[in-house]
Image (cartoon, helix red, strand yellow):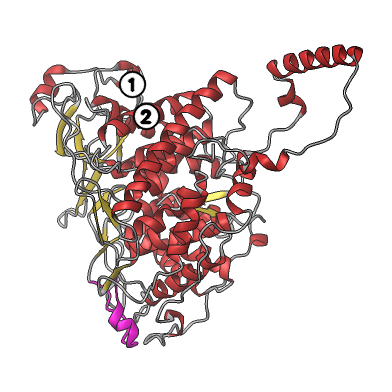
Amino acid sequence: MFKDKPEETGGLGSVYRHRVAVPRPGKRSERLLVIFTFCLVVFYMVGGFERVIPKIPESVRLERHMNTGQTLHPYKAVKSSIDWGKVKPRYPSKRPPIPLPTASEGIALPQIQHSFGRVSREDQKKRDERRRAVRNLTIKSWSAYRKYSWKKDALLPLSAAGKDQFSGWAATLVDSLDTLWIMGLREEFDEAVAAVAEIDFANSSSPLINIFETNIRYLGGLLAAYDLSKRDVLLQKATELGDLIHAGFDTPTRMPVDNINLLSVKSSEGQLIEPQVVSASPGTLSLELTRLSQLTGNPKYYSAIARVNSLFSVSQNKTLLPGLFPMYISLWGPKPNVISGTTFTLGGGADSMYEYFPKLSQLLNGAEPTLISLAHNFLTSASANLFFRPMIPDSSSNDILISGTANILPNLDDKKNSFDLSPETEHLTCFIGGTYALAGRLFSTRRYLETGAKLTRGCVYMYKSFPTGLMPERLTMLPCPSTDSSLSAGCKWNQTLWEATQKQPGLPKGFVSVTDRRYILRPEAIESVFYMWRITGEPEWQEAAWDMFVAVAEGAFAKETGGGASVKDVTVDPSKEEIRRDDEMESFWIAETLKYFYLVFSPPDLISLDKYVLNTEAHPFLRPVP
């Protein structure tokens, strides 16, 4: 499974081969040997060895393959030309660092993953074939990046070139590190690590560093690759970058900026906070900075983000939709304002902030009660205010939920706010099913898990509804009057109502409009399917994943290079019209989308949800054990 080349003599299996001189047996001995061999074959065919000899876990075999012996690509670690940790801040914190909770302060968390049993030979063969298909597609995409855009941020899969979009620090390379490790691609991983060792985090293609993207893709990728491989250079580089991100908190209020000005960091001038940012920008720094503090023993990274979470905590029930935060907030000025906004969504601009509340609680082993409250409050409020059940003709799929967008219009006359839930959704919201499922296990709350299943089925439904088998970036559906799926709630298919509401012709029944018809290789739907599979063990999720993968592999393959390419219009019928693609392959294609597909068909001990916490870019962080 760990080789992408034909089997050769030697390799992993060669350590078990040796020669022993055996005396030539007599005829009676030969007969006994034949009988014994026959019995041995029968015993093997009925699975006797599987019961007598414990199978080596996939995670153990992979660790031996990837981490044993000398690197295939020797390297010399090169420090960045500026040590960001030694640059003097203009606005040093006036308070002592908030201490990082230790593993011993945590509690024993409930089991997250389903207790998987034995798999039949037929099912195992099917899973292996599917996993191999995902791996082969990943190898093609990585090879295309390696050939046409090595050390660039992203591949242009149609024009066979590369481009820089995130500071020019080889975003796809760093983002893909743990995927290469997880798929057992030893040579490719070692070569990528050698390239990472040479990155200079003081030399950027842009004077402004987006703190959100740098954190989730670069820092997250480095930390996860270190947790898996224990290559010291990866933690060294993560620390260099973590110090730069920490410089983004060099403001009068110690709140982070959205974009770090490199020149201002170099000259110790401090950073200027933007008047308005999306809530996900400061809200999606916590997992990475916390893990960096755990690994380095330096509390400054955790302390920086703990103050942001403290602001969220004291403000959560003061917003116009208590429990949820507006998409746009302001950290500018002496009194940051995270409560006045009027638009509430789990989509782009807010999504990963909510994802991190339960995940950070898990990474800290439940040692921080504030995070548990933040998670419960948002999960409860989102269920009550953001989800709707779509009206669809397929009665067998009617128990699904979709996440919409709420707008609150303050009424100053009677002091009552006007609430409007828009049934427009986007692919980015599809992460939420997995978050609810994880929270259901983490907090032992069954209704969260049930809600997560309905939300995930909703995204699966949107995939299979379109002729390409792919979900568009943004769309609107016809909502039922209630989220209750019982017959008494009454939401039978109404053809007349749908036709009167429909804004675009030719769409599948139940869909009102598609405002962005692209599929840009996004991972959120397969992410939730992965969580549902690992948490419930129900076969429907593996089958859904395979259907999605087949559609993705057929629709997004760029024959020009072998890479993945965004699909222009998922509403076209491939049997009547050729699929058109855009010249872009985001780093999350290998980092997230293909990784999640691969893990769905892998043995469940590989990146177990009881051992690892995955960041919003699917980078697994090893959870300290209490």
Q: Is residue 588 left or right of residue 555?
A: right
SS class, disc 2: helix
The Cα atoms of the two marked residues, 1 and 2, are separated by 8 Å
Q: Is residue 541 above or below residue 617?
A: above
Q: Is disc 1 in contact with disc 2, using a CB cutoff of under 8 Å?
A: yes
| Residue interval drawn in magenta | 259-274
Depicted 20 relative to depicted 181: above or below: above
User: What type is the residue that disc 2 sits on?
Assistant: Arg
Q: Residue drawn at (71%, 19%), measured in percent from left and top?
A: 44
> Residue 51 or 5: which is nearer the viewer?
5
* Residue carrying label 2: 457
Residue, x 31% and y 16% (percent of image)? Answer: 395
Say what secondary structure mark 1 lies in.
helix
State the residue at coordinates (42%, 80%): 84
Classify 10 Å Cα crowding around label 2: few (below 14), some (14-19), many (20 and above).
Answer: many
Residue 129 in the image, given as x and y percentages of width and height: 47, 27
